[in-house]
Image: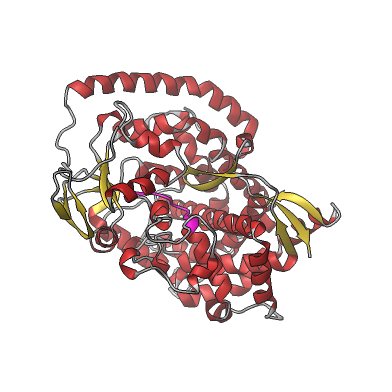
Amino acid sequence: MGYIAPRSINTSMLGKLIATLQKMFLIVAFSCTALLVVLRFVDLRGPRSKLFGLPSPGHPSFLWGHEKEVFFNQPGVMFRQWFQQLGFTYRIKAAFWAPDILVLGDPEGIAHVLRQKIYDYHHSRVVRPRIGRLLGNGLGWVEGETEHKRMRKMLGPSFTPQSVKAMAGQIWEATNEVIPDILQLVQSNNGSMQVNMLDWISKITLNVTGRVIFSHDFQGGNSTDATHILEARRTGVSQIAKYAGFLTLMLLRRFPILNDLPIWVIQAQSLTRDIIQAGVAQEMVKKATISTTSENTSPTDLLNRLVLAHDKGRITTQELYDQISTFVISGHETTTVTLGFTIWELARAPALQDRLRLELDAFPSRPTYDDFQTRLPFLDAVLRETLRLYPALPYMERLAMKRDVIPLRKPVRAQDGRVIHEITVLPGQTVLIPIIALHRLDSTWEAPDAFRPDRWLTGLPPADDLCSGWSNLLTFSDGPRNCIGFRLAIFQYKIILAALLRSFRFKETGAQMSLKIASSLQPWILGEDENGPQIPVVAEHL
């Protein structure tokens, strides 16, 4: 399929392309399914991991295994049920007779994979190509200890506590460039109106990301580049996502070669990445002015570090653009949905919203970085509760590259009655960590589906029941490959939420939310799928 100039892409064209190219995908899907039927009876799959003895849910589908149940229920629901029935570690049948999938919920086992042996567990053959398409071949995509540590060392200084603290003024300014636009809209409707906060928060977080990481002005989310980026991402998680559903996911797991074929529903995931790399990334690089003889560049400006590394031959031109697209997209999207879910929950709980606003109003001026760290405990609790309920990455899927033995803190009982204290995995074994299910386990959290920030102020569940990530959550992953920008994500979340609550009161609309996974966890309103992800609330000017 020929290359489409990013600036010529529009929603109408995308719709026509999607409708036309669906037929190509259906032909490929039919051919692959026919081949799978053959593979079902002629074993050409090579060596497989054998999870002998591990418990497994009953009644798998002949064709879909247990994966269809997982996909067509709300994220995490089936894994939660199976954790209750089978214990913290079990296996599920994969679709199309692929090898069984190891579902790992044991805290010690997860720490073993993510902390001790993470470089022996790569992104799966489904996940890694998708990361490359969505973000670029940057830090989140790279595999191997040497290469990952090289990238991490190059990028890390821009995300230290000192660097993030130095960004405070710019985060406030970038946030306050967008809020007057929301105010004007609300005031033009007698001071109260229903808005999709996800769209507005996207503008804010993109504006912040551009300012503090790349010294780039997205003009309050209204620049031409910002408009293209936000529209492309909105399209990617709505129109295209409708066609890249369950069957696509299952075929990609069984036939990884499909990742490289010109199938629109797959390759269109790269739309936002391509727009950034063909447009704003090149503009950013052109504007960057760095002395080629000095290493003393500002640590708060990631772009300067990247361009300097490129000038010194440490990274290629493509690596430079891949890192830019990675941080532009991931830098604003995950914070956007996290803030969106917070606004949704606070709109449904006016008493909690008023309590948080009262805590913020105790500061006559802007809270400082240190204030946000230690003097706003309820804001911190609201953040943690949102991250528990709505992790941006609901599932983590890894592929064992070496034989390994995973220890278990919570042994499970085998189907023959034996007690299993460790799991032997062979190369090629898929390991799935259902983060959202672990964050909502009935056996760990009281009223696990309820938004209760106070649980973070009154004491956590027993340590043996919790994972070892940030705040005993896996939202930012854990270990050497945890989210490099988590400090910045937390800081900008708190500033943006504080600014919004000082300008608006949010009320619920009565809409009912459904959660979907479209690269990250996304909020959809029941009966309004055609509108894509949204957070509809009534915003009132204070």
Residue 307 shown left or right of residue 250 in the figure: right
Instruction: Report which quarter residue 139 is drawn in.
Output: bottom left
Q: Is residue 157 above or below residue 257?
A: below
Q: Position of residue 124 (x, y in %)?
A: 31, 44
Residue drawn where x is 43% and y is 73% of the image: 295
Q: Is residue 108 above or below residue 415?
A: below
> How many numbered circles are shown?
0
Q: Position of residue 517 (x, y in %)?
A: 48, 43
Residue drawn where x is 44% and y is 55% of the image: 323
> What is the quadrant of the C terminus in the image?
bottom right
Q: Position of residue 329 (x, y in %)?
A: 52, 52
Q: Nearer the viewer, residue 275 or 238?
A: 238
Judging from the image, the colouring scheme is secondary structure
Q: In the image, is residue 534 part of the stretch drawn in magenta?
A: no
Q: In the image, is residue 397 part of the stretch drawn in magenta?
A: yes
Q: Is residue 261 above or below residue 163?
A: above
Residue 172 shown left or right of residue 136 in the figure: right
> What secondary structure predominates along the stretch shown in magenta?
loop
Q: Nearer the viewer, residue 408 or 258?
A: 408
Can the viewer see residue 289? no
Q: Position of residue 393 (x, y in %)?
A: 44, 52
Q: Which residues are magenta?
A: 389-398
Residue drawn where x is 21% and y is 43% of the image: 428
Can the viewer see residue 136? yes
Residue 400 shown left or right of residue 139 in the figure: left
